[in-house]
């Protein structure tokens, strides 16, 4: 199914599940970096607020680190791979917001050293 969304700068784009990303998402789930594994241990099996999260989920033309479809929340962990990609992340977040998702970004350091605070803050946003 294809639906159209309007971005803030007036550009209309098609929002469609990109099935070509599914194998890559599976590979990312297998590889999992430390911060993703730590956060996943808190989100999986509906441990967090009884919500069902999916790890490395394809959303339109992107792969989200964590997705809660029921609440339309995407959690992105920002580590060193995001340095220099701020514009890409901005466009991506705008695309996802236009599709009805709320993107919550968290640093790898916050996952490593402030996980409880992050989860408490996330719970308040839900």
Image (tube, grey):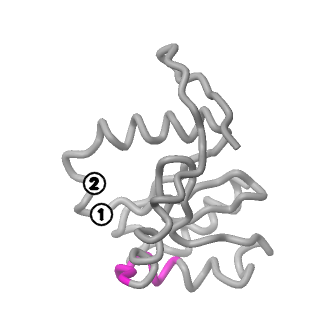
Q: Quadrant of residue 116?
A: bottom right
User: Would you say 77 lies left or right of 98 here?
Assistant: left
Q: Regarding mark 2 in the picture, which secondary structure is present there?
A: helix
Secondary structure mostly seen in magenta is helix
Residue 78 is inside the magenta segment: no
Mark 2, Cα crowd under 10 Å, few <14 / some 14-19 / many 20+, is: few
Q: Residue at x 49, y 18 (%)?
A: 11
Q: Nearer the viewer, residue 54 or 24?
A: 24
- Is disc 2 in contact with disc 1, using a CB cutoff of under 8 Å? yes
**Badge 1 density bin: few <14, some 14–19, many ≥20, Cα 10 Å:** few
Picture coordinates of residue 61, whole percent (x, y): 48, 47
Of residue 52 and residue 125, the one placed in the foreground of this image is 52
Q: Which residue is mark 1?
A: 79
Residue under the point 50% across and 74% down: 115
Looking at the image, is 39 positioned above or below residue 105? below
Distance from disc 2 to disc 1, alpha carbons, whole Å, reads 6 Å
Query: In the rendered view, does 65 fall on the left or right side of 73?
Result: left
For residue 1, side relative to residue 23 (left or right) = right
The residue labelled by disc 2 is 82
Q: Secondary structure at mark 1?
A: loop
Spot occupied by residue 108 in the image (x, y as percentages of width and height) = 35, 68
Residue placed most toward the observer, 16 or 115: 16
Residue 80, by quadrant, is bottom left
């Amino acid at each position: 199914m294809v639906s159209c969304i309007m971005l803030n700068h007036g550009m209309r784009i098609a929002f469609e599940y990109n099935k070509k990303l599914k194998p890559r998402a599976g590979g990312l789930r297998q590889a999992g970096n430390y911060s993703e594994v730590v956060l996943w241990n808190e989100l999986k099996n509906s441990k967090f607020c009884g919500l069902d999260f999916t790890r490395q989920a394809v959303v339109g033309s992107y792969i989200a680190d964590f997705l809660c479809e029921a609440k339309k929340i995407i959690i992105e962990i920002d580590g060193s791979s995001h340095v220099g990609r701020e514009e890409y992340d901005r466009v991506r977040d705008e695309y996802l917001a236009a599709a009805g998702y709320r993107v919550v970004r968290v640093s790898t350091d916050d996952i490593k050293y402030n996980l409880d605070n992050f989860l408490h803050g996330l719970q308040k946003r839900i």
